[in-house]
Structures are given as structure tokens and as C-alpha cells.
């Protein structure tokens, strides 16, 4: 197992996750605002789940996104 290669592959994957996730959140926010379905006074609860079935890994991260 080459730790340098693994590290680079994980970083590439996480970069892709971060970029695509941000785009999807921004798109959903714009659509909700345009439809009048966005309460900017209430933070949005968010959950991101990472799953790697071959490793038996399921990891959830919860947080909030302020939209004021």
C-alpha cells in the first residue's frame, strides 16, 4: 500500500466532492429563493454521508448552513 498514492487519490476525491457539493447547494438555494421557499432567518441543517461499501465505512457529518 503506497501511502503517498492513497493520500493523493483521497484528496482528488474530496476535491471533487467539495466542488460538486457546493454547486448543488448553490443551485438548490437559488431555486428555493426564486420559488419563495427560502427562509433566510433559519440556518439550513445539512448532512453529508460518506460511504465506502468495500471498507464497511459509513460516516455522517452534520452541520448548518447560514443563508442570511
Image (tube, helix red, strand yellow):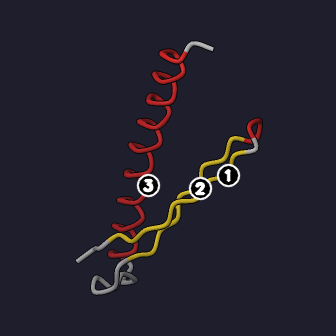
- Give neighbour class at mark 3: few <14, some 14-19, many 20+ (Cα, 10 Å): few
Residue 18 x %, y %: 41, 44
Locate residue 28 relative to residue 50 in the image: left or right: left
Residue 5 x %, y %: 51, 15
Q: Are marks 2 and 1 in contact (CB under 8 Å)?
A: yes
Of the numbered discs 1 and 3, the one sitting upstream in the chain is: 3
State how far apart marks 2 and 3 are (Cα).
Answer: 15 Å
Residue situated furthest left in the rendering: 68
Which quadrant of the view contains residue 45?
Answer: bottom left
- Give neighbour class at mark 1: few <14, some 14-19, many 20+ (Cα, 10 Å): few
Which element type, helix, strand or loop, lies under badge 2?
Answer: strand
- For the C terminus, give its image quadrant: bottom left
Of the numbered discs 2 and 3, the one sitting upstream in the chain is: 3
What residue is shown with label 3?
Answer: 24
Which element type, helix, strand or loop, lies under badge 1?
Answer: strand
State how far apart marks 1 and 3 are (Cα).
Answer: 22 Å
Which label belongs to residue 49? 2
Q: Are marks 1 and 3 in contact (CB under 8 Å)?
A: no
Query: What residue sits 51% from the left and 60% below the top?
Result: 61
In this picture, is 43 found above or below 19? below
What residue is shown with label 1?
Answer: 58
Q: Nearer the viewer, residue 7 or 42?
A: 7
In this picture, is 64 found above or below 19? below
Q: Nearer the viewer, residue 1 or 25?
A: 1
Which quadrant of the view contains residue 12?
Answer: top left
State how far apart marks 2 and 1 are (Cα).
Answer: 7 Å
Query: What residue sits 36% from the left and 81% below the top?
Result: 38
Q: Nearer the viewer, mark 1 or mark 3?
A: 1
Query: What residue sits 40% from the left and 76% below the top?
Result: 44
Amino acid at each position: 500500500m503506497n501511502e503517498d498514492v492513497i493520500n493523493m487519490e483521497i484528496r482528488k476525491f474530496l476535491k471533487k466532492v467539495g466542488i460538486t457539493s457546493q454547486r448543488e447547494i448553490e443551485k438548490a438555494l437559488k431555486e428555493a429563493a426564486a420559488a419563495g421557499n427560502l427562509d433566510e432567518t433559519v440556518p439550513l441543517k445539512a448532512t453529508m454521508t460518506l460511504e465506502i461499501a468495500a471498507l464497511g465505512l459509513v460516516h455522517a457529518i452534520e452541520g448548518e448552513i447560514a443563508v442570511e
